[in-house]
Amino acid sequence: MAVRTARTAWNGSLAEGSGQVELSSSGAGTFDVSFPKRAAEKAEGTTSPEELIAAAHSACYAMQLSAMIAEAGGVPVALQISADVTLGPDPAGGFRIPSIALTVRGEVEGLDAEGFVAAAELAKQTCPVSKALTGTTITLDAALD
C-alpha cells in the first residue's frame, strides 16, 4: 500500500514559535503553522493540525461514501462533505480532539433518503480516517439535496 509523507519544520517555543508543514509526497504545498493561531478563532492564513485532519477526513469520507452508495445500488452524482474538527482541553492535561462533526449533502440517483442515510452512516464507520480517529466522537448529519 501507498505511504504518504508530510514534514514540519518548527522554530521556537510553543507560545512564540512557528513552523511550516510541507505535503511532501504530493508536493501540493507548504503551509504556515503556529500555536497561537491554532488556538484562535480566526486562522488568518495559517493552517493547523485540526484543519489538516478535517481535510483528510472529509476527503476520505467522500471516497468511502461514494463506494457505499454504489454498494447500496445507487449512483453518486454529487457529494458535499464538511468536517468540523474541535480542539479542546484534555482532562488529563494539555489538549485533545474531542469531536468531529461530519456534514454531508448529496445528490444521488437510485437511493431514497433512508438508503442515503444508511450508506452515510456505514461510510462513517468504515472510512479509514474515521477508524484512525477512534476515541474521538464523530457525529454525522446526512441528507439528500
Image (tube, rainbow, N blue to C red):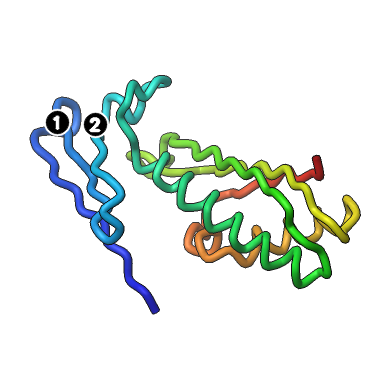
Residue 143 is marked as: none
Residue 41 coordinates in the image, percent (x, y): 42, 21
Amino acid beneath label 1: Gly
Image quarter in which the C terminus is found: top right
Residue 48, picture quadrant:
top left
- Residue at (27, 45) in percent of width and height: 29
The residue identified by callout 2 is: 34
The residue at the far front in this view is: 77
Residue 95 coordinates in the image, percent (x, y): 37, 39
Residue 132 coordinates in the image, percent (x, y): 48, 62
The residue identified by callout 1 is: 17
Question: Is there a contact, CB below 8 Å, between mark 2 and mark 1?
Answer: yes
The residue at the far left in this view is: 12
Residue 55 vs 33, above or below: the answer is: below
Between 88 and 20, the one nearer to me in the picture: 20
- Label 1 element class: loop
